[in-house]
Structure formats: C-alpha cells, structure tokens
Amino acid sequence: GAGVSQSPRYKVAKRGQDVALRCDPISGHVSLFWYQQALGQGPEFLTYFQNEAQLDKSGLPSDRFFAERPEGSVSTLKIQRTQQEDSAVYLCASSPARFPGDTDTQYFGPGTRLTVL
Amino acid sequence: EDKVVQSPLSLVVHEGDTVTLNCSYEVTNFRSLLWYKQEKKAPTFLFMLTSSGIEKKSGRLSSILDKKELFSILNITATQTGDSAVYLCAVRKGGSRLTFGEGTQLTVNP
C-alpha cells in the first residue's frame, strides 16, 4: 500500500476490557515497530519485529501487552484487562531494514487513539 | 540511561520568522539521528543524519548534526502557518528502536 495503515483509528474501552489494534505496514517492509505516545510526550518504543520474529519486546510495559506478526506482514498489538494508564496513541512504523541496526528510516502510521474509561 | 532532550518545548512565532529547534542526546552506540514532523496524525519523516557537519536541506528546512557535542539543530526559514506542528527528534542506537525526545510544539501565527 501507499503507507502504513492502522485500525481502528479510535478505540474507547471500559477498564478491564481486552483490545486489539491492527497495523498494516508498507508492502515489502521487513521491520515493524510499535510505539506508545502519551499526551504531550514523544513516542516510546514497545516492540520490534523482523519479519515474523519478535526480536525486541523490552519496551512492553507489562505482561498485559502482547504483539504478534504471524505471517511477517500485518501485526496486532493486544492489550488485556485495559487500565486507565493504557490510554495513549499507539503508533506503528515500518522500515525496509533487513537486519537490526540497519539505518533505514521508519515510516509511521496514523496511530490508534485508545481511551480507557 | 539514554536521553534525548529537545528545546524549547514550545515556541510561538510570526509568519516569516526563522526558527531553530534543538536536540541534544546522550546514548551509547549512536547510529543516527532523525527528525520528524507530527501534526494531528502520523509523524512524517524529515531528515536522517549520521555524519557530523554535513547539512541536510529540504526547501526551507535544514538540519545538521554535531557528534562531538552530541546535538542537532533543525532550522526553518520564512516560516508559514503550515509549519505549525510538533517536531520530534529521535536517536537510533545499534539496534533498531528509536528513542524520542518530548518534541517541540511550534506555532506559527499569521
């Protein structure tokens, strides 16, 4: 596709609900990243995939957060038992980088704004 | 702990002014520094800098990196209202993740 797409664009969840956020990277991009952006802050790294392999998940804030990319293209970020502090914009980015440390630019999607009531 | 600090955090100028946004960093195993512009949607890529002293330019925007003093600046000349956005600086280390600063909120008034 022309760019990274994410769905839904907005999600409101009641505290305790599970949510699933989807990312469609740019076609052919090997690397995929998830970031969390709180209001008024810069994005913070959550996790990184190289094809279907999750190479770095050190930024996931708790075991309620889980990400997958089973076929090496679309990725889903799942948050279980959502809490109010999970409210943020979740950004997905993709890159053609073929190995960790490759200096290719990351291209971002529009994000999913999650509000937990 | 890795740090990326941007200043100022917010800036209000008039159309036609020139602005300089600053980004300083402390990271181990530095690879590159990137600038993004974020309006109310996806951050859009502006520049990637890997070498000191080489200015990158795109229209009215330019940026340069100083790897000795560990900072970068983003210049915007002849600002327009469409330049109003949050400008994000990010540093890439030896792995693949980006570490972002808080951003500078730029407002350009007519």
Image (cartoon, helix red, strand yellow):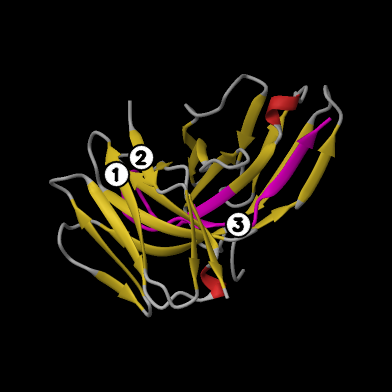
In the image shown, does A115 or A108 lie closer to the viewer?
A115
Q: Which image quarter holds the C terminus of chain A?
A: top right
Q: Is residue A70 magenta?
A: no
For badge 2, the amino acid type reads Val
In the image shown, does A24 or B41 lie closer to the viewer?
B41
Above/below status of B94 relative to A110: above
Quarter where residue B64 is shown: bottom left
Which residue matches tag 2? B4
**Residue B79 percent across, percent down from the top left:** 45, 74
Q: Residue furthest right?
A: A14
Which residue matches tag 1? B24
Which residue matches tag 3? A109
> On what subunit does the disc labeled 3 rest?
A
Q: Is residue A116 magenta?
A: yes
Give the mark nearest the N terminus, 1 or 2. Answer: 2
Above/below status of B3 relative to B45: above
> On what subunit does the disc labeled 1 rest?
B
User: Could you tell me which secondary element the residue under label 3 belongs to?
Assistant: loop
- Look at the image and give the residue range highlighted in magenta: A92-117
For badge 3, the amino acid type reads Gly
Q: Residues within 10 Å of mark 2 (few under 14, many from 20)?
A: many
- State which mark lies toward you, 1 or 3: 1
For badge 1, the amino acid type reads Ser
